[in-house]
Amino acid sequence: MQIENVDVLIIGAGPSGSVAAGYLQQQGLHIKVVEKQKFPRVVVGESLIPRVMDHFEEAGLLDALNSYGFEKKLGARFIRGAEQCVFDFSEKFGQGWDWTWQIPRADFDQAMADELIRKGVDIQFETEVIDVEFKGTESTTVVKNKEGQEYAIHAKFLIDCSGYGRVLPRKLGLEAPSKLDPHSAIFTHIQDVRRPEGIEGTQISFDIIETEVWLWVIPFSNGSTSVGIVGPTAYIENLSATLDNDEAIQNAIGLSDLYVNRFQGLPYAFDPIRLTNYSVSVSQFYGDGYALTGNSTEFLDPVFSSGVCFATESGILAAKLAKRQLAGEVIDWEKEYADYMKFGIDVFSTYVKEWYTGNLQELFYHRPENPEVKEKICAVLAGYVWNKDNTFVSKHRNIIKNMAYLIKQQD
């Protein structure tokens, strides 16, 4: 069997794999990316948060991505009946980017791949991982290309950025149940021909149907809008008696007083996609010679758009640590990688859980607004969940529920 030798093999060409590849290519390492799917492909994760801009910049992708004219995301709006809570990323606690993008992932991921290929990165699409064997910190990965030919890749380090494919967790038996309650989603892109002018037409919004059920609306610069419904799995299944995704989306839109007239009956760009019990976890984040990143480790919930952020945060960090290790440095992967990532995931998990309990919603809609509280929550929603100067990060386990309790006592 033909064997190819590389410094680092990256499995997956999505956001995590792209930032890892971009960073390592800049460092002069010999890398290869294998991707099972053919690009462009439709995938969820279309609302970014500002922290990702740091990663795209470090990976040398920012300027190229900025040239595509993706819709700018300056904040986010949360709607509950007649109540609205709007977060402006320029009014957050601490330093960091004030904006990001709302992106059709098919176009966005293709744009990243095109830029990496232009820079000389070897990306092989429609190439599936068949087997992986480790000897110490080095690995031999057998892959099959679109012509059905199998060959081996010998790597000094392997970064699994396979997302929902979860290549290493499946092959090494690392999968673990999520600590979050089971939720599901259905989404599609709608030709947004009734889009209002100005910010009302372009602003990302989350319309709360019930405490645990919400509709996302993510407008794109190409004239289409991503519309999805999220809720407990049983609720999503009951949107259609026959589990018909088209009917479920139409019924979901009908539940929204604000968006029913804008989207009802309009054509889809593709058949609606159902994601069932999507939250996942793993028993470990790394091992001898490999690191798991992005959705290969944890996927929480789309309510605060954290998915791509954790993918790129872990992708760029794994690449940096792998580069140092290959240079001869001894890396404490538990402290510098696993503990670091778990802290950020833990913070965001608290916000997801307290959203679904209703406690975080109490803080969002309490009036009059507390500007200091809102700025600190805004920093979390922007992805700066490692800034422990922010009490809504360092004391995340108790501060939301305690403040919600006080608000309820006052009412």
Image (spheres, rainbow, N blue to C red):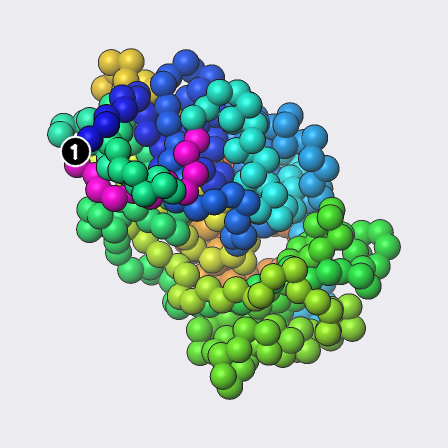
| 395 relative to 48 in the view: left or right | left
Q: Height in image: 333 above or below 342?
A: above
Please tell me which residue lies in front, 121 or 134. 121
Task: Pinpoint residue 323: horizontal percent, then vertical percent.
Answer: 34, 20
Q: Is residue 34 visible?
A: yes
Task: Pinpoint residue 365: horizontal percent, then vertical percent.
Answer: 66, 63
Image quadrant containing the N terminus: top left
Q: Which residue is mark 1?
A: 134
Task: Pinpoint residue 185: horizontal percent, then vertical percent.
Answer: 51, 66
Q: Height in image: 142 above or below 245?
A: above
Task: Pinpoint residue 137: horizontal percent, then vertical percent.
Answer: 19, 27
Q: Is residue 366 visible?
A: no
* Badge 1 element: strand
Specify the amino acid type for callout 1: Phe
Please tell me which residue lies in front, 298 or 146. 146
Quadrant assignment, res 350 = bottom left
Query: Magenta residues?
Result: 123-134
Question: For the point 41% across and 21% down, which residue is it?
Answer: 24
Image quadrant containing the C terminus: bottom right
Let me know if residue 125 is in the magenta part: yes
Quadrant assignment, res 191 = bottom right
Judged from this view, the residue extending furthest toward the left is 135
Please tell me which residue lies in front, 42 or 204. 42
Majority secondary structure in the magenta region: strand
Please tell me which residue lies in front, 152 or 170. 152
Question: For the point 38% across and 42% down, which residue is it?
Answer: 146
Judged from this view, the residue extending furthest toward the bottom is 241
Judged from this view, the residue extending furthest toward the right is 197
Question: For the point 77% across and 68% down, which residue is it?
Answer: 262
Q: How many numbered discs?
A: 1
Let me know if residue 106 is in the magenta part: no
| 289 relative to 256 in the view: left or right | left
